[in-house]
Amino acid sequence: MSPLDSLANELRMHICSFPRHHDLCALMRVNRAFHSLIEPMLYSNMELHRPGYHEHYKYPDAISSGERRNYHENDAGDYLEDTFYQDLRYTAQAFDLLKAFENPDGDNIQPCVRTSRSQAIANQVRFLCLETDLSHDEQKLVDPWGTIASFRNIEHLELTVGWPYNYKGWDSATQAFVSMDHPPLGKLRTVRLRGYFPKEFVQYVCQGATGITDLGLALLDRPIGSSGYGNERRNPPPGWKHIEPEIDGDAWLDGEDEDTASDKDSDGEDFEHEECVAPRALPTLLDSGIDLAAHFSSLTRLTLCRPTESLNPGLDMQGVYVSLKSDLAILSEWAALIGATRGTVEHLVLDQRPFAEQIETDSTGDTEFLVHYPYGPGYERFAEYCLPALLEETAEWPNLKSIRLYGFDVPPEMAEKHSSPIKPQKLGLQVEARFKPLGVDVRSGIGRRMLYEEEDGVVRRHEDGLGGPVEEEEE
């Protein structure tokens, strides 16, 4: 008998809590006893990133959440020394994991139909953090949102999701999710969502809001591609149909009048008159029939991120549609969340990212862009519609310890270093004046920009997950 076999089960579990995931996989193969002991541990904590992922992409002065990151290491090989390609490798593994839960027997089963064993393993998941797309190579996830909903005992959910190259896969996955009823994830304590999500899934996740203590939302609405590429949207709005010109220049649309062929989505936004649509935030909590923002009664950490409109970044912004409707809606949601969580929140992070087309990197670096083109219409809208909720004099913040503002102000020393023509404004100073007398640690950072592709309007899932470069080379 092995000395380990003679130990009490509690001691063996304690010992097995220290090795990394790949070591546990090897240890699980020793015998049946270790397999039974370790299998629940493998699935209970799944951090599918390269080692150091979160530490690499976080802001330098970010407040630590205190979580122990149990990275799932693998042998990436010398050819994957670049962090970008390592991230792609782990993204593929995250896809494979969700695919395995979706189709546990390798069959093309219907969405949400799972074997008793696969559901038993899904019930073991407590901590899930991954970055993925809905498609990989020639495969696609049929029901990714339903798969995540099958993790009924999950407590920590952290997802970064990119937009698929085929928008029809996105639509079918959303339809698969909304077509089924899913039990609420009542044990959730941490929810952090970055990238592209259907609002129905976000609303579902937040149904258990009273137990959530850590909420991070950096949600992007459906991208709307350029109409300048063969006059056909790469990611058309729902209900949009392509107009084919006749030889004489007139237009037709499946027998419909030209006037009915407007380029509008289901919410009535008009993308008809502009070729390119800038990234839009996805508001979710105030349009679900109930005010979900008011249900976060236990929240201690709140992190919010949105794309925002800067000053003209030196490119021809005529022909780029910026959604005022979307921006005002997300600012209303921010204000509602700030107001609803004042009594419990300890750490507040607001991150706005000026957007720019990917081609802008040919002429400016990340920091250079942020110190030359801040304080645009998006900044002004935040100051008008959201800042009052933060600065309200009569409001009490009994537990607040820190505030971080990214992408709002330019530090004077940075503007001088980059010879910026923009005079730094004072939004951060207003927040300091309101909260420093309360002992709150207030800091304002330069932030990052959000880069998107002109032809399809997509913020690629690269760099830190929201199209924001983390480092730039010195010139």
Image (cartoon, grey):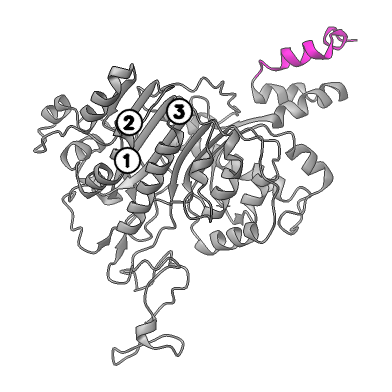
For disc 2, the marked residue is 394
Label 2 vs label 3: CA separation? 17 Å
Q: Nearer the viewer, mark 1 or mark 2?
A: 2
Read off the residue under disc 1: 352
Residue at image coords 28%, 36%: 407
Tell me: 348 left or right of 418.
right
Position of 460 with respect to 250 (left or right) is right
* Left or right: 351, with 413 as reference point: right
How far is the residue under mark 1 from the one under mark 3?
Answer: 20 Å
Mark 2 and mark 3 lie on one chain; the one further toward the N terminus is 3
- Magenta extent: 1-19
Is residue 15 covered in magenta?
Answer: yes
- Which numbered disc flags the more N-terminal residue, 1 or 2? 1
Task: Say what secondary structure mark 3 lies in.
Answer: loop
Disc 1 to disc 2, how far (Cα)? 26 Å
**Residue furthest out toward the bottom:** 248
Rendered location of residue 256, percent (x, y): 43, 88
Looking at the rendered structure, the kind of residue marked 2 is Thr
Q: Main secondary structure of the magenta part?
A: helix
Residue 345's label in the rendered image is: 3
Quadrant occupied by the N terminus: top right
| Mark 1 in CB contact with mark 2 (< 8 angstroms) | no
Element type at marker 1?
strand
Residue 209 falls in image quadrant: top right
Q: Nearer the viewer, mark 2 or mark 3?
A: 2
Vertically, is 36 above or below 185?
above
